[in-house]
Amino acid sequence: MNCFSFLFWKKGSSSATQSSEVDIDFSDIENVIRYSYKELKVATGEFSPANKIGEGGFGSVYKGKLRNDTLAAIKVLSAESRQGVKEFLTEIKVISSIEHENLVKLYGCCVEGNHRILVYEYLENNSLAQTLLGGGHNSIQFSWDVRRNICIGVARGLVFLHDVVQPHIIHRDIKASNILLDKSLQPKISDFGLAKLIPANLTHISTLVAGTAGYLAPEYAIRSQVTRKSDVYSFGVLLLEIVSGKCNTNRRLPLGERYLLVKAWYLYESGEMESLVDIFLDEEVNVEEAIRFCKIGLLCTQDSLQLRPSMSTVLDMLLGETDVNEEKMAKPGLIFDITEGRERGKQKGKAEVENASSSLVDSGRQGDSSLSGIADSFATMTFTSIYDRSN
Ligand SMILES: Nc1ncnc2c1ncn2[C@@H]1O[C@H](COP(=O)(O)OP(=O)(O)OP(=O)(O)O)[C@@H](O)[C@H]1O
Ligand SMILES: [Mg+2]
């Protein structure tokens, strides 16, 4: 048995910290590289702001150069994990043992004192949120071929997590900022399994506060019901974003234009789905295929879980190997942030859930005037009530 003594800092009930020494059996977590804090400090120039490449709900991400000259993305988790070191490492072991061309590779971690740091492969072309949807300058040409390849790659990564890995992994936070692009624009899903490393309540809070409610499946937000189908929902939203080149929510637009899902459903119903396709794509776009992708996006975001296809069916539909069955397709389910929609004396920090309400879709035609009518048909709940029921 390969048994190491592991020194870590345990937070006491007072503000002072104390050290404890525990024996941890590392024999079954051989494939995880354990980095020392000192090593990562050197790799990132003492976590210098100049090396900071992003900040998310889980903490800050730094670009770093490891001792063997490998570039890495070093994620410093801000929340102190309530898990013990052993549980933390066990989860890391699961994640690090998973390898797929469409998943970001986790090299290893650092667990020292209160520090919880994850070390990932570095992806050169940033995330879809910053490039395709970022609105700023970037040199990447998102042609239809590139977009199709990204959609299919992400679907492949999810099929792997959902159907190949045993026990399966639900990502829980599929969104544009978690889709990274390598130097040849191959997509890689990041942060899979991360939700399990962080207390679930914090994950929920960061997701909602970060304004990513647009990706949340209604049943996940209302009942904390997490299944593979909640990932399918988020993937559907992402698919519509990739084809349209637009974020799922644009607060600067009037209500009728604000939600991509609402717009997509309206265009679908009126037989104008083509108008959703990004205008920057011009002639080179395969319109028929782009429309098919939009319809798949609508299927994935159905309010009823049963109507959402599995990721493997989604992949087959994207590849054109299975027909897109529109027979039972209904209005998509949608959750949105109350603070965006109206200022009617409601508390900040509340979320509203729209249960495929026809009034919201009608607002797509009528603009802001129907807003008050829509609001009354929503179930309203606080962030607190959402995260308290998280598992
Ligand atoms: N492996 C990586 N390679 C290159 N850049 C990365 C990598 N991981 C993260 N980043 C950059 O850091 C940013 C922040 O990532 P992070 O995962 O912390 O936050 P997020 O995805 O924006 O939000 P959330 O914490 O809710 O997932 C990303 O948007 C991306 O630009
Ligand atoms: Mg992320």
Image (cartoon, helix red, strand yellow):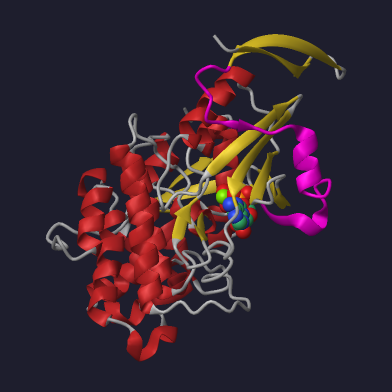
Tell which residue pokes out farthest to the right in this image.
16
Which stretch did the figure color magenta? 26-55
* Residue positioned 58% across, 79% down in the render: 139
The magenta stretch spans residue 35? yes
Q: Would you place residue 23 above or below residue 282 in this image?
A: above
Rendering coords of residue 356 (x, y %): 32, 55
Towards the viewer: 132 or 328: 132
Task: Name the side, left or right, on which 71 lies relative to 87.
Answer: right
Rendering coords of residue 193 (x, y %): 48, 37
Rendering coords of residue 303 (x, y %): 29, 50
Tell which residue pokes out farthest to the bottom in this image.
283
Towards the viewer: 344 or 73: 73
Task: Name the side, left or right, on which 52 lies relative to 30.
Answer: right
User: Can residue 389 be seen in this snapshot?
Assistant: no
Towards the viewer: 133 or 41: 41
Q: Indicate the quadrant containing the N terminus: top left, top right, bottom left or bottom right.
A: top right
The magenta stretch spans residue 37? yes
User: Can residue 191 be seen in this snapshot?
Assistant: yes
Rendering coords of residue 254 (x, y %): 51, 74
* Residue positioned 56% across, 68% down in the render: 251
* Residue positioned 77% across, 38% down in the render: 39
Towards the viewer: 112 or 362: 112
Q: Place residue 244 in its image quadrant.
A: bottom left
